[in-house]
Image: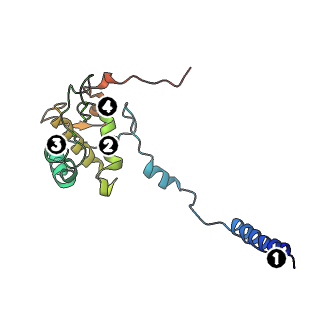
């Protein structure tokens, strides 16, 4: 007896089952609504376009920091157990280990706002209100000596801030 016919029959059954599986939609995903897209379309570039209304001070930010940030970033941004937020100025030169913090490395204050707004706190990303984001950003900027204790930041002042490492990056143009 030939094994060719049963083998062919088994292959045809498998192919038929595979074809049926492909014909049925796995129902993964759905078309996003404009509201769903808008909730994630929150990018803030260096110029500050898209910054929301609201404002914050370092004093308000300290309260937010103590409640939401200190567990990961340590007292006054010292970086224990996670990333250090403060210090490192002057450590980006040759021959030394760079300490990449908000005050030593980040070229734009708006980048800090964008990052905190979309990704912090780590276990509850996007949970801070805009005023809380402005406030905690103000506190981190104060700790890095970029603003004073009585300064208030908002959509107008944040993009105008000159970060210490603003000129440490070279703009890359994709145009030829």
Front of the two marks 4 and 1: 1
Secondary structure found at label 3: loop
Lower position in the chain sequence, tag 2 or tag 3: 2
Lower position in the chain sequence, tag 3 or tag 4: 3
Q: Quadrant of the C terminus?
A: top right
Q: Eyeballing the image, is 31 above or below 89?
A: below
Which of the 4 image quadrants contains residue 135?
top left
Q: Is residue 27 left or right of residue 3?
A: left
Tell me where residue 28 appears, x and y as whole percent. Answer: 58, 63
Tell me where residue 107 appears, x and y as whole percent. Answer: 31, 29
Lower position in the chain sequence, tag 3 or tag 1: 1
Q: Which mark is residue 49?
A: none
Q: Which mark is residue 108?
A: 4
Front position in the image: 53 or 94: 94
Q: Quadrant of the N terminus?
A: bottom right
**Cα–Cα span, label 3 and label 4:** 21 Å
Q: Is residue 165 left or right of residue 139?
A: right
- Quickly name the residue at label 3: 78
Lower position in the chain sequence, tag 2 or tag 4: 2
Secondary structure found at label 2: loop
Lower position in the chain sequence, tag 1 or tag 2: 1
Front of the two marks 2 and 4: 4
**Cα–Cα span, label 2 and label 3:** 30 Å
**Cα–Cα span, label 3 and label 1:** 71 Å
Lower position in the chain sequence, tag 4 or tag 1: 1
- Quickly name the residue at label 2: 53
- Quickly name the residue at label 1: 6
Front of the two marks 3 and 1: 1
Of all residues, the one furthest to the front in this rendering is: 1
């Amino acid at each position: 007896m030939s094994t060719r016919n049963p083998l062919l029959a088994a292959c045809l059954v498998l192919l038929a089952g595979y074809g049926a599986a492909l014909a049925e939609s796995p129902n993964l995903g759905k078309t996003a609504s404009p509201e769903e897209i808008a909730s994630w379309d929150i990018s803030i570039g260096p110029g500050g376009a898209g910054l929301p209304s609201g404002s914050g001070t370092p004093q308000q930010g300290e309260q937010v920091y103590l409640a939401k940030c200190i567990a990961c970033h340590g007292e006054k941004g010292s970086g224990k157990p996670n990333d250090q937020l403060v210090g490192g100025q002057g450590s980006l030169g040759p021959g030394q280990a760079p300490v990449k913090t908000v005050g030593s490395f980040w070229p734009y204050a708006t980048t800090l706002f964008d990052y905190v707004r979309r990704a912090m706190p780590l276990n509850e990303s996007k949970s801070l209100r805009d005023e809380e984001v402005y406030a905690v950003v103000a506190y981190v900027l104060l700790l890095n000596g970029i603003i004073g204790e009585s300064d208030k930041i908002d959509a107008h002042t944040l993009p105008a801030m000159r970060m210490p490492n603003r000129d440490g990056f070279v703009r890359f143009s994709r145009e030829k």
